Amino acid sequence: SDRVVLIPHGYDSGAFDTVEAPTEETLTLVYTGQITYPFQDPRPLFRALAIMQDKEEDLSRFRFVYVGQSHDLVRRLAAEEGIEHLVDINAQVPYEEAIARQKGAGALLYIQWEPGGEIGTYSKLAQYIGARKPILALNPTTGAADDVIETTGAGRIARGAEDVAAILSD
């Protein structure tokens, strides 16, 4: 064990210093990158938005902004919950633009990989911490990402749709 060193994920703070954040008129919850469904499942977010919509909560200034390659999946899952009007879907963008969108977000969505979320975190979590925006972590099971978020105070953890709805309502 004296020959093994653990090197956690990190981010290049200089990359965040060189990009300008876009100005948003709405509260945006942003996810950048690939969603590996069903191992990463955004449906609890979409269910939460449907719950809030059914309760007639004011979502007129809220948008979920997806930037990445999984646009067909995101479009289909949002439509299944009847909340596609709350979702902006964008194609994959260069790394610098993704960072700019993260910096301009109201909050960032992290979706833990399942099963196995208890064994590690992914570079996206470190990158989101670098953006210095609140993280809404969709972590169905407890694990390493919970520890990182709680230790850094970087955001809030949701286990399912009801948790997501409560957090967004706050």
Image: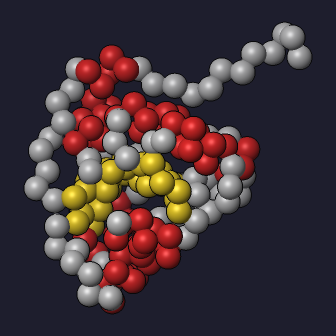
In the image, what residue occupies the spot 50% across and 76% down? 162
**Can you give x and y, in whole percent of width and height, for residue 93 in the image?**
28, 40
In the image, is residue 114 above or below residue 120?
A: below
Q: Residue furthest right?
A: 1
**Closer to the camera in the image, 118 or 149:** 149
Q: Residue 149 location in percent, x, y?
A: 54, 43
Q: Which quarter of the rendering shows the C terminus?
A: bottom left
In percent of width and height, residue 24 lies at 14, 51
Q: Looking at this rendering, what residue extends furthest in the top direction?
A: 3
Query: As drawn, is 53 to the left or to the right of 148?
Result: left
In percent of width and height, residue 131 lies at 34, 35
Res 168 visible: yes
Is any part of residue 39 visible from this angle?
Answer: no
Which of the two residues, 9 or 92, is positioned nearer the viewer here? 9
Q: Residue at x 57, y 38 (%)?
A: 151
Question: Looking at the rendering, which quadrant does residue 127 occupy?
Answer: top left
